[in-house]
Amino acid sequence: MSSTQNIRIGVFVPTFNRPELLRSCVLQLLAQTRGPDIICVHQNGEGDNYAWCVADLHAPVVWMHTPVRIPQNDWYRTPLNHLIQEDCTHFFWMDHDDIYLANHIETCIGELDGGYDFRISKHCGVLVARPHGFHYYPHTRFDDIHATGGMSASMAFTLPFARALSTDLGNPEFNHVFADEVLARHTMPRFRCLHSTQKTTVYLSHASSLSSAHWVREDTTFHEFRSDA
């Protein structure tokens, strides 16, 4: 689908117990060179509704609240299904605690327009936030860290991929530890996928990170990428 045609960009963001991070995420989306048409936030898990944290931003936010513990697959599948019903053509899987450079959406749309159903960044920055300081790794190869072969929160894809992913996330036989493993093992093999070398994201590791809190406690090193890799 050419970027000159009508496109409708949908972003889905699961969030739990971190209104400050969610506000930062929405502000980053408002700063994009190509902004989203819908930002579907899915607050899940026990706790008070914190839709107030973005109410003043005049952002195209659709707020969904599931005030109980649910399987991780449904953190993503619930807002994804809403965006499909809203006739979105391009979909962005984002997490509330990462950093998105201002050209992220525009870059992803351009790559999908090149004939791909799915794209992901295999190069990104990594920010490890510790109680008494931080360390920033600007040129990290992320291809062997997440099951998807790149930084999972950098993923973007088209409508056919979104429909297939929704079905796969809802399949009780696909019960993996992380939702992106469902995508990597069952959805990606059926589509044209790009592992992009464009750096448009920074992965944030902090003490509350679901999958990388151990990086905060340990001396962690990462493989760096070269400009020609």
Image (cartoon, rainbow, N blue to C red):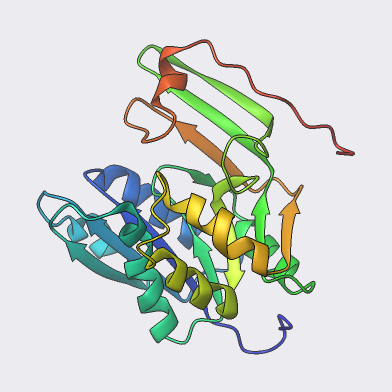
Instruction: Using the rendered view, name the quadrant where residue 136 is placed.
Output: top right
- State which quarter of the image contains the N terminus: bottom right
199 relative to 35, above or below: above
Question: Residue 218: horizontal and vertical position, in percent?
Answer: 47, 12
- State which quarter of the image contains the C terminus: top right
Question: Residue 21: horizontal and vertical position, in percent?
Answer: 33, 44
75 relative to 60, above or below: above
Residue 188 vs residue 110, the one in the foreground: 188
Question: Residue 51: horizontal and vertical position, in percent?
Answer: 20, 60
Residue 24 vs residue 149, the one in the foreground: 149
Residue 165 vs residue 199, the one in the foreground: 165
Q: Is residue 219 left or right of residue 141?
A: left
Q: Is residue 59 visible?
A: no
The residue at 66%/69% (across/down) is 190
Instruction: Using the rendered view, name the quadrant where residue 126 is placed.
Output: top right
The residue at 57%/64% (across/down) is 187
